[in-house]
Image (cartoon, rainbow, N blue to C red):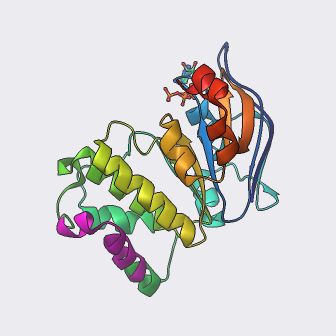
């Protein structure tokens, strides 16, 4: 579904990605793990055409379009780090906005209902402004809004960042639930153990390079690797 070949991205003189190769197949959950500054967010931004890089990125066999809007239409959604929900719009309006690329009103209404079933807390907060939600609720809204475009692949950047352990558990449970519906997930995380508990495969990034890849079981058994790169 997604293939990234020999991707290089620089910010001026800073080389953030140095020849990254990665792929995500249909329906897979794949994690990208690594310490602060490893290049994880840069990778997602390059895939969703927010940043220009050198190399080849293909989605469903075609070169990725240069506009994020077209990419959403093709079925790829990026939920960036920091949630970026619209503070002056209600939960419902944020969800409706997530469906901007769709014209099937009935399907949109069904998906809003599905999001509220997935996250009952959002139903309670439906008419509250996004800016008044807690961090955990904002993350739930960011993920739900991302799902409103009915993506085939959703990329989640650090969904557990700054959240209380009980909310982190809920978020990871939902990652499993989204995957069970057939949506592929590319998950960027610093919380390696949590991510490895929900993904099938993972890549470990260090200073812009993939230093290891493998099944989650293989990586969890590799203590040296975990201590060296994931802490
Ligand atoms: P974090 O978990 O802290 O977000 P990350 O693995 O997502 O880390 P990136 O944010 O992709 O890492 O950053 C990779 C490298 O690129 C780092 O050295 C970072 O300082 C640098 N970098 C990221 N964004 C910019 C920017 N806008 N301008 C200059 N350098 C940047």
User: Which of the pair 131/170 is nearer the observer?
Assistant: 170
Q: Give me the residue at 42% from left, 77% from top.
A: 111
Residue in the picture at 57% in, 65% down: 151
**Percent position of residue 180, x then y:** 55, 70
Rendered location of residue 50, percent (x, y): 59, 41
Most extreme residue toward the top, as rendered? 13
- The quarter of the picture where the N terminus appears is bottom right
- Is residue 73 visible in the rendered structure shown here? yes
Q: Indicate whether residue 51 is drawn in magenta.
A: no
Main secondary structure type of the part rendered in magenta: helix
Q: Residue at x 50, y 34 (%)?
A: 190
* 173 relative to 164, above or below: below
Q: Is residue 118 magenta?
A: yes
Name the foreground residue: 155 vs 90: 155
Above or below, 168 relative to 37: below
Q: Image quadrant of ligand 1?
A: top right
**Which residue occupies the extreme bottom position in the image?**
106
Q: Residue at x 65, y 46 (%)?
A: 216
Q: Is residue 100 visible?
A: no
Where residue 213 appears, as percent x and y from the top left, is 74, 38
Most foreground residue, 27 or 131: 27
Position of 70 with respect to 89 (left or right) is right
| 66 or 125: nearer the viewer | 125
Residue 32 is situated, as x and y percent measured from the top left of the image, at 62, 40
Relative to 210, 55 lies left or right: right
| Magenta stretch in the rendered image | 110-124
- Residue 38, located in which quarter of the rendered image? top right
């Amino acid at each position: 579904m997604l293939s990234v070949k020999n991707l290089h991205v620089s910010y001026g003189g800073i080389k953030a990605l140095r020849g990254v190769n990665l792929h995500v197949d249909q329906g897979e959950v794949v994690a990208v793990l690594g310490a602060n500054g490893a290049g994880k967010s840069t990778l997602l931004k390059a895939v969703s055409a927010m940043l220009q890089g050198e190399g080849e990125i293909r989605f469903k066999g075609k070169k990725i379009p240069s506009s994020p809007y077209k990419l959403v239409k093709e079925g790829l959604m990026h939920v960036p780090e920091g949630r970026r929900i619209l503070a002056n719009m209600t939960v419902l309006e944020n969800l409706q906005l997530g469906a901007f690329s769709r014209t099937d009103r009935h399907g949109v209404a069904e998906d809003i209902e599905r999001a509220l079933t997935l996250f009952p807390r959002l139903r309670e907060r439906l008419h509250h402004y996004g800016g008044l939600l807690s961090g955990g609720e904002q993350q739930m809204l960011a993920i739900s809004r991302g799902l409103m475009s009915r993506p085939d692949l959703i990329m989640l950047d650090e969904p557990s960042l700054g959240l209380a352990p009980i909310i982190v558990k809920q978020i990871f449970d939902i990652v499993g639930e989204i995957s069970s519906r057939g949506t592929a997930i590319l998950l960027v995380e610093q919380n390696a153990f949590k991510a490895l508990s929900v993904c099938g495969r993972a890549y470990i990034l260090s200073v812009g390079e993939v230093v290891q890849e493998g099944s989650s079981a293989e990586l969890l058994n590799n203590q040296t690797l975990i201590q060296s790169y994931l802490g």
